[in-house]
Amino acid sequence: MSENHDDWGEAEMDAAMLEQYQELRRQYVSEGPALLAELRQCLAACRAHEEAALEALGTRFHKLAGSGGSYGFPAITTASREAEQWIGEHPSPGQADYEFLEGAIRRIAAAFEDAGKTVRGER
């Protein structure tokens, strides 16, 4: 079976794929503010004791844990996974417990800020 890269050499294909990946990383980072807003909204719903809000928050943390790793941002993954696991261990958190989740969201925000610097070449 022969490979046809539309007359592109392997180096050009690798460079094109790398640029595509970098563009996907930039796009992901640009979505950070909206993703963080969703986390904050879910946390506010949790504080208001809205049904299924904690589960929704856990789902969002889970998605960020996976996507952070996929795009090469381990700090997003780590902070999100810690928050997801914390929710699994605290199925009925009290008001004081939400401080941990607020801190997790701050850590994720900082990780997105660092990721932005990375994709802009500032690091």
Image: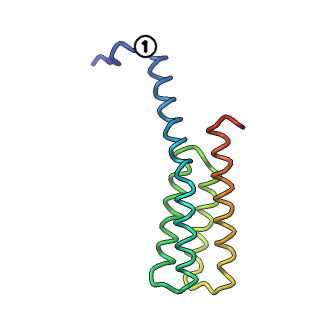
Instruction: Please say if 61 is above or below 32.
Output: below
Residue 100 percent coordinates (x, y): 68, 74
Dividing the picture into quarters, in which one does residue 104 lie?
bottom right
Dot 1 falls on a residue whose secondary structure is loop
Q: Residue at x 52, y 66 (%)?
A: 38
Q: Residue at x 48, y 84 (%)?
A: 50
Q: Nearer the viewer, residue 22 or 5?
A: 22
Quadrant holding the C terminus: top right
Instruction: Please say if 58 is above or below 21.
Output: below
Residue 46 percent coordinates (x, y): 54, 80
Badge 1, how many Cα within 10 Å: few under 14, some, many 20+?
A: few
Q: Nearer the viewer, residue 49 or 97?
A: 49
Dividing the picture into quarters, in which one does residue 8 lie?
top left
Q: Amino acid at mark 1?
A: Gly
Residue 36 percent coordinates (x, y): 57, 62
Instruction: Please say if 29 is above or below 97.
Output: above
Instruction: Please say if 69 is above or below 93.
Output: above
User: Residue tagged by mark 1?
Assistant: 9
Q: Is residue 110 left or right of residue 51?
A: right
Q: How many marks?
A: 1
Dividing the picture into quarters, in which one does residue 122 lie?
top right
Residue 57 percent coordinates (x, y): 52, 71
Q: Residue at x 67, y 34 (%)?
A: 121
Quadrant holding the N terminus: top left
Q: Residue at x 51, y 52 (%)?
A: 67
Q: Nearer the viewer, residue 69 or 17?
A: 17
Find the residue positioned furthest to the left: 1
